[in-house]
Structure formats: structure tokens, C-alpha cells
Image (spheres, rainbow, N blue to C red):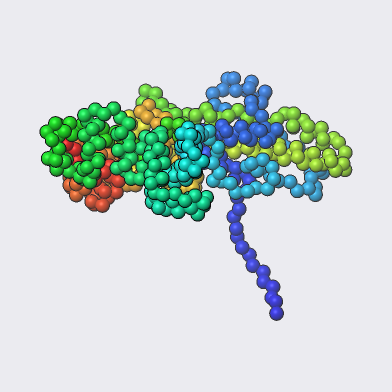
Amino acid sequence: MQKLFLSQTLSQKLSPQQIQFIKLLQIPSAELEARIEEELEVNPALEEGREEHEVSESRDETDEYEGEETLTAEEDINIDDYLRDEDFSGYKMQGDGNYSDEEDREMPLPTDATLNEQLITQLGFLGLSERKQIIGTQLIGSIEADGYIRREMEAIANDLAFSVGVEVTIEELEEILGKIQKFDPAGIAARDLRECLLLQLERKEQTEEVQVAYKLLDKYFDEFTRKHYEKISKKLNNHESGVLKDAVQVITRLNPKPGSTSNGLVKTQYLIPDFILTNNAGRLELTLNSKNAPELRVSRSYSEMLQAYDKGNKKDKKLRETVSFVKQKLDSAKWFIDAIRQRQQTLLRTMNAIVQFQYDFFLDGDESKLRPMILKDIATEIEMDISTVSRVANSKAVQTEFGLYPLKYFFSEGIATESGEDVSSREVKQTLKDLIDKEEKKKPLSDDKLGQLLKLKGYNIARRTVAKYREQMNIPVARLRKEL
């Protein structure tokens, strides 16, 4: 027997305006311009420029940031008679139609040819037979993102046999692989680090230090990776031992990941500041990048068009459909302009709070003056949700007189000192880096010793924390920091 139950549930849904705001807030300035261009293309009711009455009013006024006065909305028009029984979509992030969740969709960026495409092009220049071309293509397809081939030759031979029906010997694979290893970038298609570095040395001018460097990698690779230079020096003759230090420097300048090179083989995206902070005689002044303050307005012609339709025949179905379309575009334009305005205000509120929190640091750029600061500190200060602060901090940067900093740089945990005060973990990292920079390179400091020195300076942290901070700064262990 079926029973009917009545229950109440409380749920929270984001409105189209909120979705719009969230999406616009999290993108950096570099992508905002492209996003605005996209909206201008799909919405004819949105235009660039200021309203005429605002231009005259703004001549004698100074706004907090350029472009804010242009963010206006047209007056609402009563068209209930047209839309009494009609359904129409509100503002959508990507044109018209039903909303789909594309929050993680990336903005398209201009890119050059991929590494694989570059290598295939170079393969074509060899004029190989069709069989060898197939083998070469298979080998190139086995190259990983960092430029190495880690699959065994037997496995690649099996791939060729099963996928394209080509039976090959290991010798044939080695022959074609040798040709590919002469392609650019140097070191490509190596099977391990040793082979990668040797391939790069083969292309260099064969000076004395290059020849010794080749010998180090060819015969004493294990000793070299462990930095057992004294053992290596005893195995070399007197002349070779004399240029050992120069040979090591030659090796350290080689590229261990040739597939990750940026000389036209991968896309590059530059960091553009969202904020500009200047020090005017001891007074910090914050402004938004002008890309964050576009001049936008609702199309006057579309507003006038809607007013004209208001006087038409309300029973005409085609006219009602036209009015629905025009009204939708006008609402979309207003909502987009409002979302841009909210974005500007939220960015400034958040950054102003960060500046006030880290005021001493922004005065002179001294990292030791950075205070412990977490997302909750700023969220509490500006009375917004932590997720909002996170969206601002994740992809934004500020230009100061002493460098360009991502906002995430200013957030760090607090560490208690012996005096009971909280200091930023970034301050501890800087002190740790200074200790390592000043250490005797022939006898680098262990993590235990570094921890003891930090405690003498008042930072009470464990050895494992020292190791964690060192790894976060990409500083190798003591054994690998040893120099001649």
C-alpha cells in the first residue's frame, strides 16, 4: 500500500547573476579582456563606451578607479503584457540557451606547434622510406612530455607489430632512434638522464672541459650524481683533474628536461598584474589595472527598440517573440555590467585588506616583515566568504616597486617563536635560505644542523619542518649541495 508523505527541505541555489559574478571574479586580468570581447560578440545590447550624460558628469569628478562611472543600467520598462505566459532564459555565461556547467573551461590561448608536431616535421626532412617513417612516428609518439622515451624497445616493437602490422628488429629501432636523437631540442628522445646529457654534450664545441664533462657522465656517472668529486679526481689524470670544476659547471648548465623547453615548442603565458601599488612619500596607493575597468553601456538603440515595441500590437505572436528576445539581451547586458562592477569592488576590497594587513612589508619589500596571514583573516576583515577571497588570491597578482607578486605569496601559516610571538612561515623560509646561502659549500649544513641554527635565532621548528620548507623552495639536500 502506497503512502504519501509531506516533507520540507531547505536548499540553496545560485542565481544566474551569482554564477556570473563567480566566474568573472576568478579569471585574471589577462583573460578578462577576451571574456568581455566574447560577450560583446554574442550580445548586441552591450556596447563599449560611456553614457552621454555620464561623460559630462565625470569631467569634474575623480573616481577611485577608471571606468567605474560607465557601469550603468537602463531604466526598466513595463512589458508584463508581452511576457505574461512566456518563458525565457536569464543571463547565460556563454550566449543563449540553457546553462551548462563550464566553470573550469580555459580561455583559448595562442600556441605554437607542439613538441610532437615539431619532431614529426623534422622526421619528414630525412626522406626516409615509408617503413622507416612509420617506425620513426611510433618512436616519436612514445616520447613523454619531458622529452624522454621510457618504454623498452621490445615494447615499442610489439606496438608496431600489433597496431600497424610492421615487424621490426631492435637494431632497426635503435637506428631510427639515433636519427631522432639528433633532432632539436638537444637531448630529445633519450632513455635516461645520462644519455640525455651526453647527447647535449656531443653537440657542443669539444673543448677540454666539455671532453672531461663527457668522460664524467660516460664513466663516472654514479660518482658524479653522488658528488664524490674526490674519488673522481683520483681516477682522472692530472690535466683532467685540473679542469674538473669547469667540467662540472658545463654539466650543470645542460637541460635535464629537453621536452619542457620553451623555445617555440610550448605555449607561454605571461603574468599580468591585476593591481598596481605605489609608495607616494610613505603613503601606499592602490589602483586596479585598467584592463579591470572597461567602459561598457547598454545599447540605447535596443532600449529605444523595446519602447517602440511597447506601443505595438500586444496580441501579435511574432512581436511578442521579438520583445522577449530584446528584453533578454537587455537584461543580459545589465547583469554583465553589474557583475563587472561587483568584480572591481571585490578585488579592491580584498587587496586593500591585504595591503593593510601586510603594510610594513609593502613599504620596503622586506620579507622578514611579512605577518602570518590566512584566508580567514581577510575574509573576516572584508566580511565576505573565504571562497571569495580564495578566488581573488588564486589567480591575481600585484605590481609593487620591488617586484611582481602573486597574491598567494602573502598568505602563510604562523609559527610561534620562543618569545611567544607568531611569525610568518615565509620569514622562517627566508632565514633558512640565508643560512644555506652562507654555508660552506664544501661542507653543506644538514637539516639537523639547520634546525639547530634556526632555534638559536628563536624559531622553534623540527627537523622534518626544515626539510619540508627546504623542499618547498626547491633546495636539494646537503649531499647534493656539495661543491668542489
Which residue is painted at 22% across and 30% down in the image? 209
The one nearer the camera, 476 or 6, is 476
Which residue is painted at 53% across and 35% down in the image? 109
The one nearer the camera, 427 or 131, is 131
Q: Position of residue 229 (x, y in %)?
A: 16, 40
The residue at the far bottom in this view is 1
The one nearer the camera, 127 or 283, is 127
Q: Position of residue 358 (x, y in %)?
A: 37, 37
Q: Is residue 480 visible?
A: no
Q: Position of residue 61 (x, y in %)?
A: 56, 22
* 50 with respect to 448 (left or right): right
The one nearer the camera, 322 or 479, is 479
Q: Position of residue 484 (x, y in %)?
A: 16, 36
Q: Quadrant of residue 245?
A: top left
Which residue is painted at 36% across and 42% down in the image? 190
* 216 with respect to 110 (left or right): left
* 254 with respect to 223 (left or right): right
